[in-house]
Image (tube, rainbow, N blue to C red):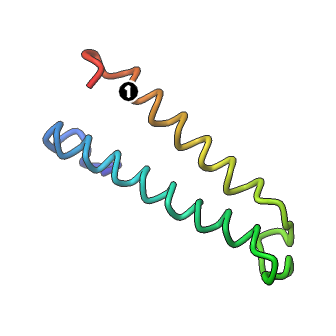
Amino acid sequence: MAFKGNSLNTSVRNKLFYLDNLSIIVMMIVAVYTHLHPYVPAEVLPMEFKPPVMPISYIVFVLLNIFLYKKSIPNGN
């Protein structure tokens, strides 16, 4: 999509955009659950850090990406 995105139909491009962002949100929700699970040791987590700072920040970035994308569409679809 990064290289052929402009040649795609607008409807398909929008659906792919939202599907991609939704998949990232789902993965990050699983990551937050993993970080908060009491039986997961910090040694198996990225940077061996127990609080779910990275997954929550990615969720915020995805929501910001969706907001800016909707704002950039001329008719606001």
- Report the residue at 84% width, 82% height from top: 41
Element carrying mark 1: helix
Q: Is residue 41 left or right of residue 28?
A: right
Residue 51: x, y in percent? 83, 60
Instruction: Work out which residue is located at the far top of the displayed protein and give it.
Output: 74
Splitting the image into 4 quarters, where does residue 55 fall? bottom right
Local crowd at mark 1 within 10 Å, few (<14), some, or many (≥20)?
some
**Quadrant location of the C terminus?**
top left
Q: Quadrant of residue 34?
A: bottom right
Decide which of 3, 39 is in the foreground and name it.
Answer: 39
Which residue shows up at 30% across the image and 51% down it? 1
Three-letter code, disc 1 = Lys
At x 62%, y 41%, the residue is 60
Residue at 25% of width from left, 16% of height from top?
A: 75
Dot 1 corresponds to which residue?
70
Residue extending furthest toward the front: 38
In this view of the protein, which residue sits in the foreground, 15 or 36? 36
